[in-house]
Image: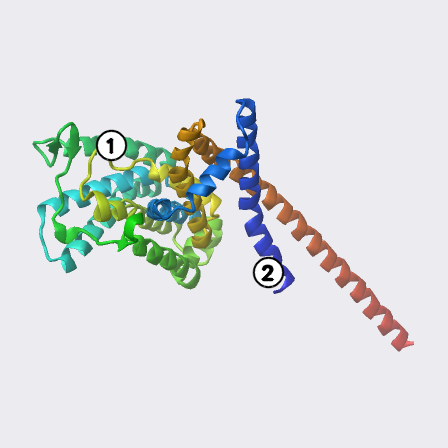
Amino acid sequence: MKKFDKERLLLAVAGPVIALVVAVALTSVVLIASGKNPIEPYSIMFEQATFSDIQVLIINQASLYYIAALAVAIGFRMNLFNIGVDGQYQLAAMMAAVVGAHVALPAALQVPLLILTAVFTGAFWAGIAGVLKVTRGVSEVVATIMLNAIATSVIAYLWLPSVFGVKVGNNNTTGEMHKSGWVPGFSMGEAGEIYGLVILAVVLGIGYWVVLNRTRFGFDLRASGASESAASASGVDPKRMVLTAMLVSGGMAGLAGLPILLGDTHTYSLNFPTGIGFLGIGIALLGRNSPVGIAFAALLWAWLDKASPELDFHGYDKEIAVIMQGLIVIAVVVSYEAVREWGLRRQQRRVGAELAAGHVLGAANNTEKEVAGR
């Protein structure tokens, strides 16, 4: 492996590793300050990860986190902060559940219909923020935050019995979806069942890498994110790329709730998981917008979620995991900036050394010419 490649790998790995070490250290300090054992909680959670049923839960939860983080990462690549993934996936899941409860087609048509419904709903909702940004200059951060609040109100309206809502006890639901829209999972025996749409998460990860690194669209996207003026000079329309990136990000966000919707709940209710879009931001940051890095980060987040409830039975608060997640996000921002500065300094020293070497070589050549001329 070339020296340059080794340095790039080191820079890519250093940030997440530093962030995790700092987060663990700070969490341990919190435990010590509260009079708790700083080591035992980690051993308890690591032990939970060895149980097959917990492993199934981790994989299922990670599939949701992974898709949401990919949606966030697409925006990051374009230097956009799509903070509206949470509203986009919830509204998309609601619309898919409504369509699934009122339309009955053969499975070969029903499942693609539900997927397309989720994609178009998420893309439409993110597209509103994209249009506002390119036409009125409205910050996508402000627009998507407002759209999250509006999405919550739209969902509350659709839950009304006079619209699409179906009351089940004290729970608001959209009614059970037709079985042709259910996606069977992979049975792990007594451990449970892995969602069938985990495969969708894998396909999206591969597609994300291929599109960004092997297509003209991916190049234009990264170029526009790095420098709009440079992209414009090369013939790329930055405004078109902003709108396209928001549409693609929203469309992918719309898929984040489908693994659990089509593989488990089969209805959209008050019990449907929320907050996945916001967690996706931290996961995308920790994974450095890389599909492989995001996969590891999603598994880490899911492990913290699914292993932490056991802490309650050992005298520890399960919120320790939430504290660690928050500290990881903070540490990620700090460590990445530190690693970036370190990388820039190394690059500057390398360039300086190469220029100095070139100057010495040039002087030596001139001396040889002078000697030869004599």
For the N terminus, the image quarter is bottom right
**Residue 139, image quadrant:** top left
Indicate how the structure is coloured in the image: rainbow
295 horizontally vs 359: left or right:
left
Q: Is residue 162 above or below residue 347?
A: above
Residue at image x 46%, y 33%?
Answer: 326
Q: Are marks 2 and 1 in contact (CB under 8 Å)?
A: no
Residue 311 rendering spot, x and y as whole percentages: 42, 32
Q: Kindly tell me whether residue 81 is visible in this rendering.
A: no
Q: Earlier in the sequence, mark 2 or mark 1?
A: 2
Element on which disc 2 rests = helix
Residue 79 rendering spot, x and y as whole percentages: 44, 45
Residue type, numbered disc 2: Asp
Residue type, numbered disc 1: Thr
Q: Label for residue 5?
A: 2
Residue 106 rendering spot, x and y as whole percentages: 11, 58
Distance of label 2 from label 1 (alpha carbons): 46 Å
